[in-house]
């Protein structure tokens, strides 16, 4: 029996930080998979990109093929151990928002939990400005809010096609991080019970 938790949240929300901290605390043994890393690996194998931030600029049909290949790889890993996927509900591409998990992809992965990490648009904007390593798109607070709204809507459709439960975790500046981590740990600890 597999146990798959999907962690979503827009760039700069603190998703990867919270995930790594929660994994140090939980008693459950999860394999952490960054969906973007696997997307990048497959795109490089196919000779389509050289840099990570080029993946979301590939044409949507090509990205969908890569998503499906990644989903199949994850499925075979999920047979062996609980999986935590660091990913995105929707990806902002130059042509429009792309679904992170189109029908065939969500039906392949069938997550047990979809965690949505959120913060206020001004908090996200501030974190993006401090993270200069990445080629992040520059967005206004209104655009950030719209993206978060779309991600909630996308999560509903993913739950519809997988029986996943949805959990929204807020990550705010003042003391928010520890609370956010604790909420995620609570979800991950359920895997221990499921696999006992
Ligand atoms: P990161 O922000 O480090 O998590 O990496 C994000 C990049 O990985 C995105 O810009 C996308 O190109 C890609 N990515 C991550 N998850 C997905 C997904 N579910 N579907 C398509 N691309 C994804
Ligand atoms: Mg990340």
Image (tube, rainbow, N blue to C red):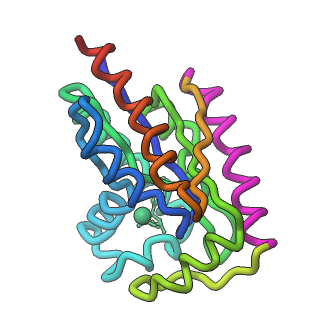
Q: Which residue is drawn at 43% across and 32% down?
A: 108
Q: Is 41 or 137 nearer to us in this picture? A: 137
Percent x, y for residue 75? Answer: 31, 34
Looking at the image, is 124 positioned above or below residue 176?
below
Asked if the stretch drawn in magenta spans residue 100, the answer is no
Residue 111 is at least partly visible in this image: yes
Looking at this view, name the residue that lies furthest to the top: 196
Residue 144 is inside the magenta segment: yes
**Residue 13 drawn above or below residue 139:** above
- Image quarter where the N terminus lies is top left
Magenta highlight: main SS: helix
Residue 188 found in image quarter: top left
Residue 126 percent location from the top left of the image:
60, 79
Task: Look at 38% across and 22% down and name the residue there.
Answer: 190
Q: With 41 as the anchor, is 147 left or right in this view?
A: right
Residue 104 at x, y percent in the picture: 51, 37
Q: Which residue range is magenta in the image?
A: 142-163
Is residue 90 toward the left or the right of residue 196 in the image?
right
Who is closer to the viewer here, 47 or 129? 129
- Give the residue at x 56% y 21%: 163
Farthest residue toward the right?
142
- Who is closer to the viewer here, 175 or 129? 175
Can residue 73 be seen by looking at this rendering?
no
Residue at the image point whose x is 48% and y is 40% from the top: 105
Could you tell whether 151 is left or right of 58 in the image? Answer: right
- Image x and y of residue 106, in percent: 51, 36
In the displayed structure, 191 sits above or below 129; it is above
Q: Quadrant of the C terminus?
A: top left
């Amino acid at each position: 029996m597999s146990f798959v938790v999907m962690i979503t949240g827009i760039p700069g929300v603190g998703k990867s930080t919270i995930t790594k901290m929660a994994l140090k605390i939980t008693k459950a043994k999860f394999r952490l998979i960054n969906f973007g890393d696997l997307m990048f690996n497959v795109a490089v194998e196919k000779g389509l990109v050289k840099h990570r931030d080029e993946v979301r600029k590939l044409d949507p049909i090509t990205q969908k093929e890569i998503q499906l290949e990644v989903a199949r790889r994850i499925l075979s890993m999920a047979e062996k151990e609980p999986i935590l996927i660091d990913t995105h509900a929707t990806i902002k591409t130059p042509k429009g928002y792309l679904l992170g998990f189109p029908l065939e992809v969500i039906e392949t992965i069938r997550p047990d939990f979809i965690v949505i990490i959120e913060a206020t648009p001004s908090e996200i904007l501030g974190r993006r400005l401090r993270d200069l390593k990445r080629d992040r798109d520059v967005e206004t607070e209104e655009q950030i809010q719209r993206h978060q709204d779309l991600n909630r809507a996308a999560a509903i459709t993913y739950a519809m096609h997988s029986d996943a439960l949805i959990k929204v975790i807020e990550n705010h500046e003042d003391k928010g991080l520890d609370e956010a981590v604790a909420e995620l740990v609570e979800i991950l600890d359920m895997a221990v019970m499921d696999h006992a």
